[in-house]
Amino acid sequence: MIVELTADDFAVLLKGFAPRNLRLVPDSAIAPPEVLEMLARIAAEVGAAFAPSAWMMVEEGEIVGLCSIIRPPENGEIHIGYGIAPSRERRGYVTRAIAQLLEWARKDPRVTLVSADTGVENIASQRVLERNGFIRTGERIDPEDGPVICWQASIV
């Protein structure tokens, strides 16, 4: 399930602890500290104009990953990113979380389109989006990630 991730939750995660009554994955981090810091900053920037902006992926009381809106929405489009603890990959958690995120988006009148990018080599992430009805819309070169595939899911 996805649970809204607040600034307080990010602060707790950045100290190496799990917020609320949740647990962290014991054998691998959900994200390195520098990535958590970046996500907290982006969530604060996006959250100033649009909330919620970030979520924890929670399975059986354990935070297995994170997903978020990674740039301010434009004309009803939200652009998402996500990641999961390496030891929790290939269990369907991300597919379920993105399905729940789309379900939330369909109920929010501010959102008309959800987009995402995947690395050209990241087949698992591509399958997550395909399973959730995303359509491949092209490719581009990302300054940080290199070649990526662009995806969109209409929610109206």
Image (cartoon, rainbow, N blue to C red):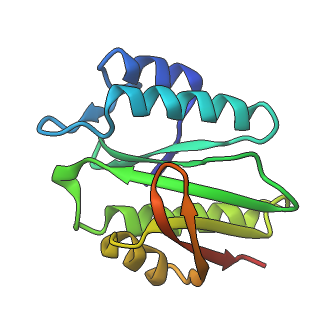
Residue at the left extreme, as displayed? 27
x, y percent for residue 54 = 57, 42
Residue at the right extreme, as displayed? 75
Q: Is residue 106 above or below residue 59?
A: below
x, y percent for residue 77 = 77, 63
Q: Is residue 87 above or below residue 149?
A: above
Which residue is located at x 50 percent, y 79 percent?
132
Q: Nearer the viewer, residue 11 or 140?
A: 140
- Residue 87 shown left or right of residue 66 in the figure: left
Count numbered badges in the picture: 0
Which residue is located at x 41 percent, y 18 percent?
12
x, y percent for residue 78 = 71, 58
Q: In this view, does 23 lie above or below 64?
A: above
Q: In which quarter of the image is the N terminus?
A: bottom left
Which residue is located at x 52 percent, y 44 percent?
55
Q: Nearer the viewer, residue 21 or 131?
A: 131
Quarter of image, res 128: bottom left
- Residue 39 shown left or right of residue 36 in the figure: right
Q: In which quarter of the image is the C terminus?
A: bottom right
x, y percent for residue 125 = 38, 69
Quarter of image, res 28: top left
- Residue 16 shown left or right of residue 144 in the figure: left
